[in-house]
Image: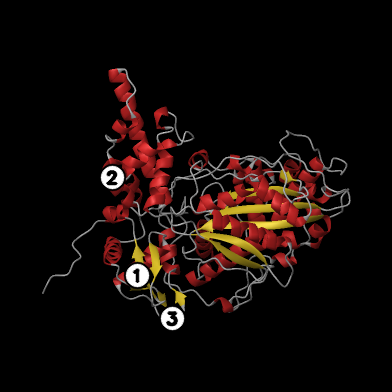
Amino acid sequence: MLTFFSRIFFTISSCCSLAVPRVGIVAAAADTMQPDATGHGAGGSSGDQGGSQRNTATGPAQASASCSSPGVSRKRPRSQHPIGDDGAGTQEGGRVPAVLPLGSQPVPDAIQGGVQNVFNDAMKVSAVLAKLSTTDLASFTRMYSPDFLKSASLPLLGSDTNLNLAFDVAIHNAHVTDDDPRRFLVVKGVPGSGKTRLGYEVLRMWDDPDRLGKLAGALGHPVHLVRLFSDFNNGGRFLEDVDGDNMAQNLGARLASQALGVPLDSVKILSGGSLTGLTVANVLGVALQRMEAKLHPSIPASAAGGRGGVHAAVDPPSAKMVFLVAVHLDEYQVYMSHLALCRRTKQGQMSSTDSVDYARWAFKQMLSALNHFARSSVVQDRWRVILLPIVSGTPVLGVPMLATDKLAQRLLSPAILDRTSAEQLVASVFTSRCLSDAFSELDGAREVVLSALRRGAARLAIGDSGFRPRLLVNLGQNARGQTERIAAACQAEKGVIPDVASCLSSVDWRAARDSVAVVFHGIVGISGAQKRALVKAALLQTPIRFVFDVDEQPGTLEEKALQAGEAAGLVHLDTTADEDYRVVRMPLMQVKEWGTVDFLPPAY
């Protein structure tokens, strides 16, 4: 049984940008924790929290004009495409994968040759690696966008279960064997549900001294952190003139780009116009060697100068250093869509089915490149590496996330808010000094704010959000901005600072709501008739068939609309008693923007 959406996905992806641009920069933090007798420790790096305002309709930041929309296609059963950890696909119908299987690549240059000459070959590969070898890796928090970090000061409600699971995955990956594959975390959900924020929190959770101390205690050794972030929708988006067929190099270039704080195309220029050798293994190998040299100056490496900020623990002289390498890859589906579209355009005769297969296979190679680094005997002989990949995005967008033979996925889902938690989140927006301090009286007025949010137009506006975190944050920011302007005008006119309650009573909640709902307007890739069909299905809660056999296609307007809306991440679907059917959930903000008519049938 297969979900039919790959055709719709590519049609939507090729049309236009649906996402608000957001700076996507990457960094790594070098922090350590020395376990004490109880398994806990002190220290670790501090970092900002993160949250983000982005367009509800997630999609490519820039669609290539050369990429045309594919025709009808269907997903094939996974059994037809066995893919191992080395990323090598099978030859099928005479089609040979264009990407060199990772298993056939040489051992990474940056980690060959023993301790004394670990950089010798790597420095011949790329000036980028040479620069990385002399550059301290900054705190990863600096590499998320400023707007993201501001709203990340807000509480992440219901995250404890997810963070506990992430910790368990780290423990599992520390003791992984060939018979029990490593695990990676997949954060999935509808746009606006908090996927990026949850991925960020998995990186930030290690700033908690107790949690990092618990990990160090379980391993009996200090743990050094390398935390990386890459956003495939902005700074790390697909670039046709940069990306090649080798996915290990494509990802390695992105990690190097973000770590150095330079654009991706600049990395290629610095490398002499080629990404050859700039693999994930080489980039991570240089990063770990750099950190090792700073923590143990007696171990030769390239210049270990640079600024401070690394909290060193004392490793036993004869013991291997332990590194937790946590890598957050965000909006992966955008990269895959551009890769597949442009691949199909270049190949000419490639079907959209094959382009979907290629994109899925190619992204698996990126994950396999990370795993290959951690599994390498050269790496294992020198260090103990605990790999913790976090992949966030909207997996429904055409190309589902599938595990490799050596990587098993574990799902993290952002918490679903109810009215009470939604009110608490909006109240936090009003009272957070990190967002604004223009009306300082809001600080400490949480109960007054909550009282205002629980009645009248404010209550209705919150309900219209469907309790999606991003919509709630944007709603709160719009209303807070009004409150600050009302207070400033009153002070200018009367010379006194008004009380919070009176300012809140003057907020135009309809305007605040409509400013948020505008993200649902003008969406390209789904017709007006399909929008109306989805609105009707959401209001009447009508089950619509969503899963089809291999030889079937959606036939009715409702079925086609459901495929289009789900593929674009525009609707949230609930399961029904019949596993082939879904019920549409849609915020009233979206219902309003897409238009409503009287869907009730006549009496006769």
Which residue corresponds to mark 1? 560
Q: Taking 351 as reference, is 285 above or below it?
A: above
**Which residue is at 82% across, 41% downward?**
302
Of circles 2 and 1, which is in front? 2
Q: CA distance from mark 2 to mark 1?
A: 39 Å
Q: Taking 590 as reference, is 357 above or below it?
A: below
The answer to whether residue 117 is visible is yes
Q: Residues within 10 Å of mark 2 (few under 14, many from 20)?
A: few
Element at label 2: loop
- Give 136 or 9, whichever is nearer the viewer: 136
Residue 536: percent from the left, percent from the top?
26, 65
| In this rendering, position of residue 272 left or right of residue 199 | right
Q: Mark 3 or mark 2, which is nearer the start of the sequence?
A: 2
Which residue corresponds to mark 3? 549
Of circles 2 and 3, which is in front? 2
Q: Residue 564 occupies which quadrant of the picture?
A: bottom left
Question: Amino acid under label 2?
Answer: Arg
Q: CA distance from mark 2 to mark 3?
A: 48 Å
Which labelled disc corresponds to residue 268? none
Which labelled disc corresponds to residue 455? 2
**Which residue is at 53% across, 52% downward?**
198
| Quadrant of the snapshot with the C terminus | bottom left
| In this rendering, position of residue 29 left or right of residue 112 | left
Question: Amino acid under label 1?
Answer: Lys
Q: Mark 1 or mark 2, which is nearer the start of the sequence?
A: 2
Question: Amino acid under label 3?
Answer: Asp
Element at label 3: loop
